[in-house]
Image (cartoon, helix red, strand yellow):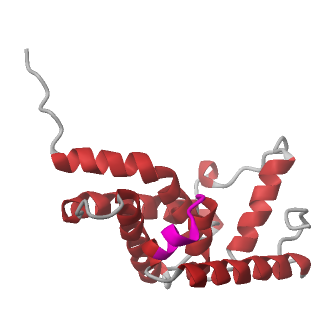
């Protein structure tokens, strides 16, 4: 009987990094492309591929999750720059009916609140969105600073400015219909 080979160190590290950071990577992808599912999924696959190709460079002197998220952020920035000028819209007559979005009349209020929040987040710059996604993943200012190569005080002040910007956008009605997320 043929026994499978034990996982190599590379595979073990890769699996460990995904286990620790998969949710954070998914949130990072959504932060870069809050309204575009196709590019969000494309970015996710690019990040996973980049992690696999770079995992041999990890040195155990630091945190694996911080290293993983640093690779993910750098890959996301590159992906976003490369796709910034890509044509974003297809004529509706070229899409098959199954590809068109469906409106779910049964959607509950929390789903609608998340949609409104994502519409507001889409108005932020990519740098603000990546910072916010790391914050939403419950990373501390110190961890975010390590990932983004900045200081913890800078992270805290930038998060505060982002919060105020979101509140101002909400009050201007940029997320119509109105939401009670920030009140």
For the view shown, which residue lies furthest in the left direction?
1
State the image quarter where residue 135 is shown: bottom right
Q: Which residues are magenta?
A: 137-145
Q: Give the residue displayed 82% in from the left and 80% down from the top.
A: 169
Report x, y in % for residue 85: 49, 85
Q: Can residue 33 be seen in the rendering of this structure?
A: no
Report x, y in % for residue 19: 41, 45
Q: Is residue 139 magenta?
A: yes
85 and 174: which one is in front? 174
Report x, y in % for residue 88: 56, 75
8 and 50: which one is in front? 8
Report x, y in % for residue 126: 57, 79
Residue 64 falls left or right of residue 90: left
Q: Can residue 20 be seen in the rendering of this structure?
A: yes
Residue 97 falls left or right of residue 167: left
Residue 177 falls left or right of residue 52: right
| Quadrant occupied by the C terminus | bottom right
Residue 179 falls left or right of residue 117: right
| Quadrant occupied by the N terminus | top left
State the image quarter where residue 49 is shown: bottom left
83 and 112: which one is in front? 112
With respect to residue 2, does 12 lie above or below? below
Q: Is residue 126 magenta?
A: no
With respect to residue 34, does 152 lie above or below? below
Task: Say how many tags the image has.
Answer: 0
């Amino acid at each position: 009987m043929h026994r499978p080979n034990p996982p190599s160190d590379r595979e073990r590290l890769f699996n460990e990094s995904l286990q620790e950071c998969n949710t954070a990577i998914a949130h990072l992808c959504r932060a870069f492309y809050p309204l575009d599912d196709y590019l969000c999924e494309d970015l996710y696959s690019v990040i996973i591929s980049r992690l696999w190709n770079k995992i041999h460079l990890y040195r155990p002197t630091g945190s694996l999750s911080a290293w993983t998220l640093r690779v993910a952020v750098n890959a996301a920035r590159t992906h976003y720059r490369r796709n910034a000028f890509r044509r974003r819209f297809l004529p509706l007559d070229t899409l098959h009916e199954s590809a068109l979005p469906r409106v779910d009349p049964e959607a509950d209020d929390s789903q609608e609140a998340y949609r409104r929040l994502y519409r507001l987040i889409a108005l932020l710059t990519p740098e603000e969105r990546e910072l916010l996604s790391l914050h939403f993943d419950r990373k501390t200012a110190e961890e975010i600073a390590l990932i983004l190569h900045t200081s913890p005080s800078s992270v805290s002040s930038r998060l505060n400015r982002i919060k105020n910007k979101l509140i101002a956008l909400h009050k201007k009605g940029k997320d119509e219909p109105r939401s009670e997320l920030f009140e």
